[in-house]
């Protein structure tokens, strides 16, 4: 039986630098003048779902080599890195995975991260993306630990279709109960993410819009992306966000809304009757690399500068090799200042999905969505 291992090149480009005694801080800009503002932290590469577009069961089967516990960053290690990133300008931290709520005692990590403040003294924006299956049980403890809000993924209201898409027999009702629990404890505003696959769940666009309209939750439609190497992505299965907007507007008139910030990934649309808003994330048809301020920390402590990267920078080696805070902060600065990634912007001008980079791209479940 062959064991499948995610190809992660340990380029470990981060040198240990005999740096200044003071830990370097201050906002970092990459080669395209993009500041480092967001950090996504993957706390586990495991998941209880097998979404067809993310962890297809044929690849992520019982023989799949998930990371051993010793490879995972500890909560202390995550907190130490997060603190250094915040000193370098990060204002928003999103916990993700895999399924983050599968990580044991996640609340302890949230308690630590919730204490972080920006150099200007503001609390960081701490959030989490979950498939919702454990949210009903955990909403209260997450809120009490200091989580401010939550994003829940849900791809359909039709139960048969949803079970087919998560391929693990989880019911829509479980996720809706999780959303209700999050709402009840004040983990707000709640965002609901729906990945749209043309020919699979595009018939659910209008029912989902109808369901969440007036609910207070913001439904966001994500274009199906060519992340990783295992989901068999095909452009024919991408439904452009423009079509999503058209389909909804035919039923419920929409008006464009201003972006909250330049780095916002979603384009916002409001219901003309004032009953809420939706967002569309056009990662394929309208790339937003120009304003991409996100770095991703993998479960085992590799820093990725793009969702489509094939290698990361090994910060765990620094942490466990005795590097000082100043060493690590200097390394992070060098890494970000050398960044030039803009995969989605270049996607259209690149040759078809082939070649070494594509074959080594990391999986979304490993790097965090
Ligand atoms: N397990 C959690 C969840 O599903 O919310 C967090 C991790 S998941 C990788 C983060 C987000 O990535 C989810 O909203 C998921 O729908 C989205 N995602 C995964 N694969 C995708 C793909 N191929 N294209 C677009 N979005 C994808
Ligand atoms: Fe799991 Fe989230 Fe990927 Fe679905 S999208 S398989 S819930 S990590
Ligand atoms: Fe950012 Fe890479 Fe996505 Fe562009 S393709 S928006 S650089 S993560």
Image: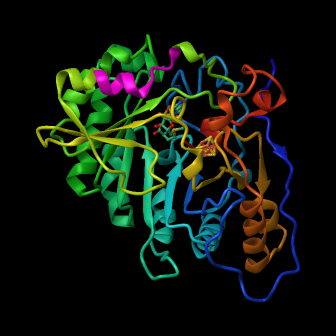
User: Is residue 62 toward the left or the right of residue 18 in the image?
Assistant: left
233 over 331 or under it: above or below: above
User: Is residue 271 toward the left or the right of residue 221 in the image?
Assistant: left
192 over 250 or under it: above or below: below
Badge count: 0
- Name of the residue lying farthest toward the left: 273
Query: Which corner quadrant of the image does residue 22 belong to?
Result: bottom right
Residue at point 65%, 50% (across, down): 299
User: Is residue 225 toward the left or the right of residue 64 in the image?
Assistant: left
Is 312 or 357 nearer to us in this picture?
357
Image coords of residue 358 (percent x, y): 76, 28
Residue 203 seen by the camera: yes
Residue at point 13%, 43% (across, down): 274
User: Is residue 1 toward the left or the right of residue 78 in the image?
Assistant: right
Is 116 or 35 nearer to us in this picture?
35
* Image quarter hosting the C terminus: top right
Residue 133 seen by the camera: no
User: What's the image's color scheme?
Assistant: rainbow
Residue at point 51%, 64% (across, down): 109
Image coords of residue 80 (percent x, y): 64, 71
* Image quarter hosting the N terminus: top right
Residue at point 62%, 69% (across, down): 85
- Magenta region: which residues? 237-246
Prevalent SS, magenta region: helix
| Residue 239 forms part of the magenta stretch | yes
Image coords of residue 53 (percent x, y): 54, 24
- Name of the residue lying farthest toward the bottom: 21
């Amino acid at each position: 039986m062959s064991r499948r291992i995610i190809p992660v090149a340990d380029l470990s480009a981060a040198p240990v630098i005999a740096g200044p005694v003071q830990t370097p801080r201050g906002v970092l800009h990459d080669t395209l003048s993009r500041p480092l503002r967001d950090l996504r932290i993957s706390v586990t590469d495991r998941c209880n779902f097998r979404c067809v577009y993310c962890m297809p069961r044929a690849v992520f089967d019982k023989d799949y080599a998930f990371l051993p516990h010793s490879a995972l960053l500890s909560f202390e290690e995550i907190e130490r890195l997060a603190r250094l990133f915040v000193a370098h300008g990060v204002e928003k931290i999103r916990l993700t995975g895999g399924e983050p709520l599968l990580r044991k005692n996640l609340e302890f990590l949230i308690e630590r991260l919730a204490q972080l403040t920006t150099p200007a003294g503001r609390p960081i924006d701490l959030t989490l993306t979950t498939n919702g299956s454990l949210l009903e049980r955990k909403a209260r403890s997450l809120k009490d630990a200091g989580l401010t809000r939550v994003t829940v993924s849900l791809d359909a209201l039709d139960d048969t279709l949803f079970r087919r898409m998560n391929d693990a027999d989880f019911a829509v009702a479980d996720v809706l109960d999780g959303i209700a629990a999050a709402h009840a404890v004040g983990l707000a505003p709640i965002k609901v993410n729906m990945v749209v696959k043309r020919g699979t769940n595009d018939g659910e666009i209008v029912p989902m819009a109808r369901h969440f309209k007036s609910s207070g939750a913001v439904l966001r439609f994500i274009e199906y992306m060519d992340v990783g190497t295992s989901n068999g992505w095909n452009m024919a299965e991408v439904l452009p966000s423009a079509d999503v907007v058209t389909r909804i507007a035919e039923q419920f008139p929409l008006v464009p809304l201003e972006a909250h910030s330049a780095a916002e990934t979603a384009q916002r649309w409001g219901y003309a009757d004032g009953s809420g808003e939706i967002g569309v994330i056009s990662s394929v048809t309208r790339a937003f690399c120009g304003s991409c301020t996100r770095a991703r920390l993998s479960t085992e402590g590799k820093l990725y500068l793009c969702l489509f990267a094939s290698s990361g920078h090994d910060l765990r080696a620094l942490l466990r090799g005795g590097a000082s805070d100043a060493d690590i902060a200097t390394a992070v600065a060098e890494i970000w200042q050398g960044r030039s990634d803009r995969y989605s912007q270049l996607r259209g001008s690149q040759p078809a999905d082939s070649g070494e980079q594509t074959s080594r791209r990391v999986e979304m479940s490993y790097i965090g969505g």
